[in-house]
Image (cartoon, rainbow, N blue to C red):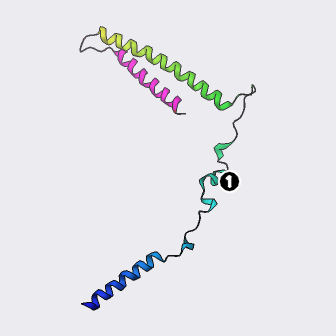
Amino acid sequence: MAYHSNRMDQTRRSAIVLLFSTPLAAVQPPDLEDDPAERRRNREPFPGDEPDPKLPNGKSQKDAIAQQRHAEALDAVSEMITLAQQVRTELEKSGNFVVSVSTIKKTEEIEKLARKIRGKLKS
């Protein structure tokens, strides 16, 4: 029994010595290449990273396109609100079980406008 516990003590000691005797030289400071900020500074430009072309008046072309899309989205929202109000009025006037074809067409137009607005806002 003494042999068994003595051997177990040696195994524990060996494990503890191995655990704490790892060379500190193995822990190295991170390379500068691993630094995300350094990688961003040294990276090659992506194909879409070209400088923004300017319009003849000096304004950014991307800003002008974004402004135009925003105005188009606002116009589409106004039209959608008008159609939604018309659908509401028609539904209030119609009976419980009657829906006109024009009401259904207006709801389809509302759906198209909603997709159009979503596309303008995403791009």
Q: Residue 94 colored magenta?
A: no
In the displayed structure, does residue 94 sit left or right of residue 26?
A: left
Query: Along the horizontal axis of the image, is 112 left or right of 2?
Result: right
User: Badge 1, how many Cα within 10 Å: few under 14, some, many 20+?
Assistant: few
* Residue 80 percent location from the top left of the image: 45, 18
Q: Main secondary structure of the magenta part?
A: helix
Q: Secondary structure at mark 1?
A: helix
Rendered view: 33 above or below 57: below
The quadrant the C terminus occupies is top right
Instruction: Answer with the quarter of the image where residue 69 lies.
Output: top right
What amino acid does circle 1 point to?
Asn
Check residue 106 for magenta coloring: yes
Residue 18: horizontal and vertical position, in percent? Answer: 44, 79
The residue at the point 55 percent across, 22 percent down is: 72
Q: How many marks?
A: 1
Residue under label 1: 42
Answer left or right for 108 relative to 62.
left
Q: Quadrant of residue 58?
A: top right
